[in-house]
Amino acid sequence: MVALSSIEWTDMTWNPVTGCTKISPGCKNCYAERMAKRLQAMGQPNYSNGFQVTLHPHVLEKPLELKRPQVIFVNSMSDLFHEAIPESFIQQVFAVMRRASWHHFQVLTKRAERMAEMAARIDWPTNVWMGVSVEDETQTHRIDHLREVGASLRFLSLEPLIGPLPNLCLDEIDWVIVGGESGPGSRPMNQEWVLAIRDRCHEAGSPFFFKQWGGFQKKKNGRLLQGRTWDEMPATVQRAVA
């Protein structure tokens, strides 16, 4: 379960865990839930439990088999800090990332409280980027928890952005991704919200990556913001983005 990814800001996905549960407004139209149910219906064995949290020890060491350096998004189909995942398994995931030192690993969570609680017990590899998802002003506390961890690179995924972030603080934040919601029932994203975040990023010196518009906006404008794409990446890695 290491696969090439169509996600614009990564190369590959690696899913040692699949399945999750909804905890905040951004989860309402979860793409991973839709995909998991589709894969279950297709008979994909790793999704026999649908979207229930399921550990996959048999794929833990898959990144070690990839000899060419890659940017790898960890658990695109789950949340590594979900309360149903034993800490011992989370530590195993970090151990593999530490051993696979030639890759860059991107870990993204909405469970910022558990991430921060565990942070002192994690030996943070320098090749692991730690991020939190923030969809509107009610979830910005996750950013404060992110600042507590010892990751060498901290990033934000402001996706699906469903509200403005007028008080966004980017202190100690190294990268910002913004994206709208896609799929059935997608909620619109206001351009002014995005421009305000872009300008805040430039003021703070944080690279800004615009992933996509959401819903009907995506069909019309795709990835263009004011007539151009924004594919800024952290200085530690530069990728050729399609």
Image (spheres, rainbow, N blue to C red):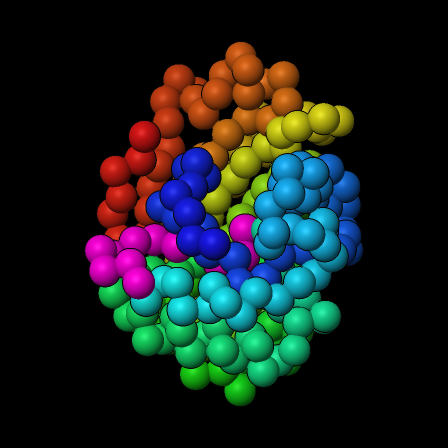
Q: Is residue 107 left or right of residue 233?
A: right
Q: Residue 166: which quarter of the image? A: top right
Callout count = 0
Q: Is residue 75 found inside the magenta-colored segment of the image? A: yes
Residue furthest out toward the left: 68
Q: Is residue 11 left or right of residue 216?
A: left
| Residue located at (64% from left, 22% from top) | 215
Residue furthest out toward the bottom: 121
Residue 236 percent coordinates (x, y): 26, 58
| Residue located at (59% from left, 42% from top) | 159
Q: Report whether residue 61 is seen.
A: yes
| Residue located at (72% from left, 26% from top) | 184
Q: Report whether residue 168 is seen.
A: no
Question: What's drawn in magenta, residue-wise?
Answer: 65-76
Q: Nearer the viewer, residue 47 or 220?
A: 47
Q: Residue 21: which quarter of the image? A: bottom right
Q: Is residue 184 found inside the magenta-colored segment of the image? A: no
Residue 105 percent coordinates (x, y): 39, 61
Residue 20 percent coordinates (x, y): 70, 56
Residue furthest out toward the top: 220
| Residue located at (47% from left, 54% from top) | 1
Q: Is residue 75 left or right of residue 48?
A: left
Residue 57 percent coordinates (x, y): 53, 70
* Position of the C terminus by quadrant: top left
Q: Nearer the viewer, residue 153 or 30?
A: 30
Vertical comparison of 163 with 154: above or below: above
Vertical comparison of 20 with 55: above or below: above
